[in-house]
Image: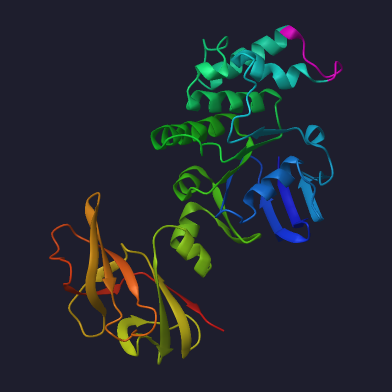
Amino acid sequence: MDVTINHIRKEFARFPALNDVSLDIRSGELIALLGPSGSGKTTLLRLIAGLDQPTEGKILFGDEDASHRTVQERNVGFVFQSYALFRHMTVAENIAFGLKVRPSATRPPKAEIRKRVADLLDMVQLTGLDKRYPNQLSGGQRQRVALARAMAIEPRILLLDEPFGALDAKVRKELRRWLREFHDRTGHTTVFVTHDQEEALELADRVVVMSQGKIEQVGTADDVYDRPGSPFVFSFIGSSSELPVTLAGGGVRFNGRPIGIGAAGEGPVDGKARLFFRPQDVVLMDAADALSGKVTACRRLAGTRIAEIDISNGEAKGGKPHHVEIEVPLDAPVTLGADLSFRPTRWRLFFEG
């Protein structure tokens, strides 16, 4: 089922939670809505579900305008972070609930409901736990029950709101892998909300990066990480450092000094810009046209180390000092207070004005 979000605006007490948001979701895609708190991602998910109504704009399911249809009319499956399971019902009863409360005209026979519950228990790898209650399950098992309950009604679209947020890191990682495999088997159009970058980049076919009620960028994990389209995306996705620089004669200068990288073809010949680069995209060197400063901190990170460097060189007195983080080999002679010079090997310039 294709989903089209067409110029959606949503206001709460005249506050725009979403402002002119448009998005095309292809049938069978697994889409992540990623952003900080207050970015509008959960509001957008609730609008797709029909739990809220848009102030302006349309939501299409295929060619059908679903903007003002109820949750039941849209036939969506919704999985909440809190699971929202009925504590007084068994696993099997929870999964069957959406089918049993249907009007009699559309309610499947009891035997068909039992078979569908058994099939779903097998699909979510919980066979044999049908008579247990939610408080007898682990967090990961409860999340699988919630997913099976959402799937029982054979939804056109599956929606998940921070599905693994309440779980510990190890269980979260296992369930991410399982959900990807589950999605590939079922082929449902799936949209999930997360603030976890690793989760979004690992799971989704495409990531929708949101900020302040707008979509900043839509793309694959490689797109949003390697080719960020805005300063926000570069700083939000992964680790990065940012420096105010000036462009002069096709070169980039920091604090008035050339740093050995060019800006040819990037934009204006002269002017101010912001330079972004990631810790791993640097090379250590001893050169005059490089960034240099003193090591103020150093920490181990798996097979490498991260060094924090103050590159102000005494030129930011009375102002904001400039600290950057770079990745250095374990055998690099890096000690606190030592001088270090480096140059970005991959970077992005965003121009001011």
Point out the residue furthest to the top here: 111
Residue 116 inside the magenta-drawn segment: no
> With 134 as the anchor, is 287 left or right in this view?
left
Which residue sits furthest front? 318
Check the image and report above or below for 130 versus 203: above
Mark yes or no: residue 227 visible.
no
**Where's the N terminus, which quadrant?**
top right
The residue segment tinted magenta is 103-110
- Taking the spot 74% from the left edge, 46% from the top edge, the residue there is 47
| Residue 60 in the image, given as x and y percentages of width and height | 78, 47
Find residue 280 and report its horizontal and vertical position in percent: 31, 62
Q: Is residue 137 visible?
A: yes
**Which image quadrant for residue 151?**
top right
Q: Residue at x 17, y 67 (%)?
A: 336
In-front residue for pair 159/88: 88
* Quadrant of image for the C terminus: bottom right
The answer to whether residue 292 is left or right of residue 272 is left
Majority secondary structure in the magenta region: loop
Q: Residue furthest right?
A: 105
Residue ID at (50%, 47%): 200
170 sits to left or right of 339: right
- Which residue is at the front of the view, 334 or 66? 334
Residue 70 position, x and y percent, is 82, 37
In this view, 140 is above or below 246: above
Count every numbered label the image shows and give the total.
0
Scheme of colours in the image: rainbow
Q: Position of residue 250 (x, y in %)?
A: 40, 88
Q: Residue at x 22, y 51 (%)?
A: 303
**For residue 63, above or below residue 336:** above
